[in-house]
Image (cartoon, rainbow, N blue to C red):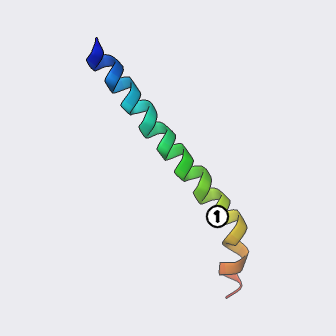
Amino acid sequence: MQLVVTLLVVAAAAATLVQTYRVGDSGARAAWGSVASSR
């Protein structure tokens, strides 16, 4: 039972990290996309 809980926690943490990265990446592209394309 403890193994199942551990796996769920690890999976949730990984999903949170991936989602945070994707949101940050899309925000950076929105903020800096025009700067990069104007060079």
Q: Position of residue 9 (x, y in %)?
A: 40, 27
Total number of numbered labels?
1
Kindly identify the residue that appears in the image at 71 percent across and 85 percent down.
38
Q: Position of residue 11 (x, y in %)?
A: 39, 32
Q: Is residue 19 left or right of residue 39?
A: left
Between 17 and 37, the one nearer to me in the picture: 17
Check disc 1 and report the residue beneath it. Answer: 28
Quarter holding the C terminus? bottom right
Going by the picture, which residue comes out furthest to the top? 1
Between 13 and 38, the one nearer to me in the picture: 13
Q: Is residue 30 left or right of residue 11?
A: right
| Amino acid tagged 1 | Ala
Q: Position of residue 1 (x, y in %)?
A: 28, 11
Dot 1: what SS? helix
Tell me: residue 20, above or below residue 32.
Answer: above
Q: Position of residue 16 (x, y in %)?
A: 50, 39
Tell me: residue 12, above or below residue 27.
Answer: above
Asked which quadrant contains residue 19, the reply is: top right
Q: Is residue 30 left or right of residue 8?
A: right
Between 5 and 23, the one nearer to me in the picture: 5
Kindly identify the residue that appears in the image at 61 percent across and 51 percent down.
23
Kindly identify the residue that appears in the image at 70 percent across and 79 percent down.
35
